[in-house]
């Protein structure tokens, strides 16, 4: 027994040493990455000073500086946005620069080459130059929702929110955010239980499942797919079938303080049933306790009553 305790202690120390080594390596890698990024940025600023017409270098400088930083070019200081505006001054058809403006614009308008553009118009300009940009199609819908617009026009064609999300996932089937938002917002625009993406039909639930195939730690997506299921139904995610109860467990493994999901899980169980959540076994009664904010495994300590 003593030998087992010694071996266990030695293994524990070895595991801790390995964790410390990994942490040291990660810190070294982080320092190295920051050094490389700093060197590349300084190099790009030098290149812009040598050739102020190099719009690719202007874009690199503007998109890699932190907020509040400036770059000195020929004794003139430029903010990140001013660098991007220089890009568009040199090449008005630089799609990434238009997208950058859309992503970073806070004020209602930005002045580009004497014309004013809103956040949404910046995204539209980017898409008219590069219609295969999945991220920009997704971001464009955010501006539509904020501006309360039902449609937008890109290159002479009118798009609803659903159609923008469909374009996003057709451009990049791994855009999990677009799949999720297509399920949440896209079906408001259509009188149908499914949408066509690249010739294939997807229901709301299948859209969320596509999101979870890409990002299985998206708690909001697990909540949504659970809400779209009946107690006896299953959903297929990346070839694996999940019951509604298993989806609820996934939610709790991502946030074990979700009292509504604990109650939902308890309601799905019968007396005598047990489930495993984060390697801990729970009875129905214990799930109900968690739903009421009581955790039997947590040491609350001796709490004194306040006077």
Image: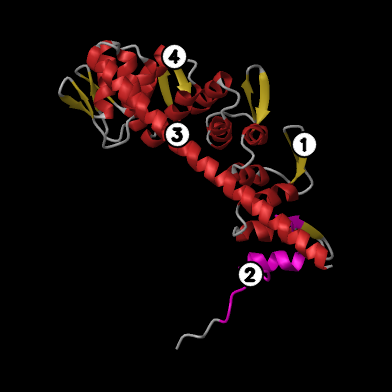
Q: Quadrant of residue 204?
A: top right
Report which residue position mark 1 lands on: 240
Magenta stretch in the rendered image? 276-302
Q: Nearer the viewer, mark 3 or mark 4?
A: 3
Q: What separation in Å lies between label 1 and label 4 (alpha carbons)?
A: 36 Å
Of the image marks 1 and 4, the number of the one nearer the N terminus: 4
Q: What separation in Å lies between label 1 and label 3 (alpha carbons)?
A: 40 Å
Does dot 4 land on a helix, a strand or a loop?
Answer: loop
What residue is drawn where x is 61% and y is 36%?
Answer: 215
Q: Quadrant of residue 68?
A: top left
Of the image marks 3 and 4, the number of the one nearer the N terminus: 3
Q: At which x and y percent is residue 270?
A: 82, 61
Report which residue position mark 3 lands on: 32
Q: At which x and y percent is residue 95?
A: 38, 16
Does dot 2 land on a helix, a strand or a loop?
Answer: loop
Q: Note whether 182 is above or below 6 in the view shown.
A: above
Of the image marks 4 and 2, the number of the one nearer the N terminus: 4
Q: Nearer the viewer, residue 275 or 179?
A: 275
Q: What separation in Å lies between label 3 and label 4 (alpha carbons)?
A: 34 Å
**Label pair 4/2, CB-CB below 8 angstroms:** no
Report which residue position mark 2 lands on: 298
Q: Quadrant of residue 61?
A: top left
Q: At which x and y percent is residue 271?
A: 82, 65
Of the image marks 1 and 2, the number of the one nearer the N terminus: 1
């Amino acid at each position: 027994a003593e030998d087992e305790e010694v071996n266990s202690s030695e293994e524990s120390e070895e595991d801790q040493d390995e964790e410390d080594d990994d942490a040291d390596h990660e810190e070294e890698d982080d320092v190295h990455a920051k050094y490389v990024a700093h060197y590349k940025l300084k190099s790009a600023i030098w290149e812009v000073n040598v050739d102020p017409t190099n719009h690719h270098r202007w874009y690199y400088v503007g998109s890699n500086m932190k907020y509040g930083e400036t770059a000195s070019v020929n004794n003139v200081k430029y903010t990140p946005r001013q660098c991007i505006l220089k890009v568009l001054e040199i090449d008005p058809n630089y799609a990434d620069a238009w997208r950058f403006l859309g992503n970073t614009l806070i004020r209602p308008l930005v002045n580009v080459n004497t014309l004013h553009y809103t956040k949404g118009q910046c995204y539209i300009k980017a898409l008219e130059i590069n219609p295969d940009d999945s991220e920009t199609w997704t971001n464009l819908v955010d501006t539509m929702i904020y501006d309360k617009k039902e449609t937008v026009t890109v290159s002479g064609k009118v798009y609803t929110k659903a159609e923008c999300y469909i374009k996003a996932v057709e451009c990049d089937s791994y855009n999990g955010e677009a799949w999720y938002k297509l399920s949440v917002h896209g079906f408001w625009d259509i009188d149908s239980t499914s949408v066509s993406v690249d010739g294939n039909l997807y229901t709301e639930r299948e859209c969320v499942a596509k999101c979870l195939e890409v990002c299985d730690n998206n708690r909001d997506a697990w909540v949504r797919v659970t809400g779209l299921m009946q107690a006896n139904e299953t959903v297929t995610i990346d070839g694996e079938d999940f019951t509604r109860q298993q989806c609820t467990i996934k939610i709790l493994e991502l946030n074990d303080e979700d009292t509504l999901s604990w109650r939902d899980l308890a309601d799905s169980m019968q007396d005598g049933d047990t489930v495993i959540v984060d390697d801990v076994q729970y009875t129905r009664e214990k799930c109900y306790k968690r739903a009421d904010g009581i955790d039997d495994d947590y040491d609350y300590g001796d709490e004194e009553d306040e006077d």
